[in-house]
Amino acid sequence: MIAFEATRAWAEAQDAADPLRDFRADFHIPQHEGRDTLYFCGNSLGLQPKGVRAAIEAELADWSGLAVEAHFRGRSPWMHYHEYVRDAMADVVGAQPHEVVAMNSLGVNLHLMLVSFYRPTAARPAILMEAGAFPTDRYALESQVRFHGFDPSTDLIELEADGTGGTLSMAAIERAIAEHGHRIALIVLPGVQYRTGQVFDLARIVRLGHARGCVVGFDLAHAVGNLPLALHDSGADFAVWCTYKYLNAGPGAVAGCFVHDRHAHADVPRFAGWWGHDKHTRFKMGPHFVPTPGADGWQISNPPILALAPLRASLDVFRRAGMPRLVEKSRRLTTYLDWLIRSRLDDTLDIVTPNDPAQRGAQLSVRVRAGRDAGRALFEYLEGRGVIGDWREPDVIRLSPTPLYNRYSDCLGAVEVIEAWRSQA
C-alpha cells in the first residue's frame, strides 16, 4: 500500500515517476484561462488523441484522390476497414477477434442483440435488469418486452439497490435469479453502474444465469477501456459498449459488440443486412442471407470510414500502453483521489462508489452532504475553475481519473478547489 501524502511535491514526484506519464502528450487537453483543465470526465467523453486528425485526413485524402477505388487501393482499403480495429478491441475486452465487431451505436447494437437473444415464451418471458439503469437500457428492454406482446409491469424484473449509496449487492442478484430464474429469458446488467461507479462480477452473473437457463448479456459502456475484462472467459452470450468514453473515439463514435464464440455459427433470428453476409460471397448479390461467422454476421451496413478512423487512432494508444499497465495506474490514481477526499473532505462529501478497488474502476461518484442544491453549486464552482467532472441526477458528481492522461497532481488540484469552495460556502 502506498503511503500517500497530500502535498504538491509528493504528487508531482509520483507523476514524474509514472511509467505512463508520456501518454498524456498524446491527447489534446482543453484549456481554461491559459492552463490545462483538470479533466475528470473521461467516463463521459474521452479526450481527443492527437493522432485522430491525421487518421481522418488520410481517409479524406484517399476519398479525394481515389474516390470509389479507395475501397481497394487506398492506403488502408475501405473494404476491410472495420477489421483494422478488431484485434486491438478484442485485446481491450478480452475476446477472440472474431467475437467482436465495431458497428452502429450502443443503443442500436443492444436492440440487434435483443432480436437474437431475447426469445421469450409464455412460460419464460421476463428480463432481469437493475432498477435505475441508464435510460438507453431501460427504454430498449421495456420496448422489446412490449414488442413481444408481454407486460413490462410483470415481465421486466428490476433489481432495487440494497447497498450503501445506492449500490446493488451480489447477494441481491443471486436471490433474484434463484427466485425468478425459471421465468427469466434474459439477464442484462452493466459492467459498471453509471451513477455509482460500482463494478459487477460478470463471470459470476453468467454462471448463475446459465445455471437457471437464462441468456446473459451486458452493457459495458462504462467498463470498456476502464477495467480488466475477459469477455470470452466470462461466458457472456453478448455484450455491447460505446467507444467515446474511455476509448476516446469521439462524440457519437462507432460502438462495439461482442458475441460469444459458441454463437458464431448459430442459426438465430437476426435483422440481416448486406454487410453481415458471408464476405466470400457478398458481392455475388444473392437473394438469400448467409451470415458471416462470428460477430461480423450481425453487421447491417458497410463500415463508416470517417467514424472508424478515430477509434483506430485511439486503440493504437491502448496497444502501446497496454491494459494491464493502465489498470494498475487507474487503481492507484483512484485510490489516491479516494484517500484525499476521505482525509480532507470527509465533512463535505460522501463517496458513493465502493471503497474496495475490486468493485470500482476509474470513477468516484460523490454526494455533497449539505444536499442537492449544494451539490449543484459545487459542480458549477468546479466548472468555473477548470475542474471538469459531470453531474448525474438527482445529486451525484462523477470524477474519473483516467490513467492515459490524468495525474496525481490533478487529483490533488481538484481536492484543493473543493476545499476552497467549502471555505467560502
Image (tube, rainbow, N blue to C red):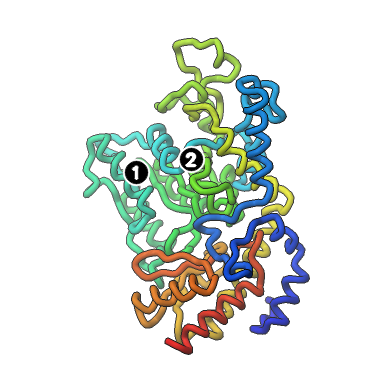
Image coordinates for residue 188, horizontal then vertical, percent: 40, 47
Q: Secondary structure at mark 1?
A: helix
Q: Quadrant of the C terminus?
A: bottom left
Residue 55 appears left or right of 159? right
Q: Residues within 10 Å of mark 1 (few under 14, many from 20)?
A: some
Q: Residue at x 38, y 33 (%)?
A: 115
Q: Circle 2 is placed at which residue position?
A: 238
Quadrant (top left, top right, bottom left, bottom right) of the N terminus? bottom right
First along the sequence among labels 2 and 1? 1
Label number found at residue 140: 1
For this rendering, which residue is in front, 156 or 213?
A: 156
Front-most of residues 294 and 19: 19
2 or 1: mark nearer the eye:
1
Q: Amino acid at mark 2?
A: Phe
Query: Of the numbered discs in the image, which one, if any, rests on residue 242?
Result: none
Q: Secondary structure at mark 2?
A: strand
- Measured as percent of width and height from the top left, residue 10 is found at 72, 80
Mark 2 to mark 1: distance in Å?
Answer: 15 Å
Residue lying at 58% horizontally and 20% vertically, measured from the top left: 279
Q: Is residue 100 visible?
A: no
In which quadrant of the rendered view does residue 414 lie?
Answer: bottom right
Depth check, front residue: 203 or 117: 117
Location of residue 96 in the rendering, given as x and y in whole percent from the top left corner? 63, 38
Residue type for callout 1: Ala
Relative to residue 258, is residue 361 depicted above or below? Answer: below
Instruction: Inspect this view and state whether residue 148 appears.
Output: yes
Q: Is residue 344 left or right of residue 130?
A: right
The residue furthest bottom is 423
* Closest to the observer, 219 or 22: 22
| Badge 2 density bin: few <14, some 14–19, many ≥20, Cα 10 Å | many
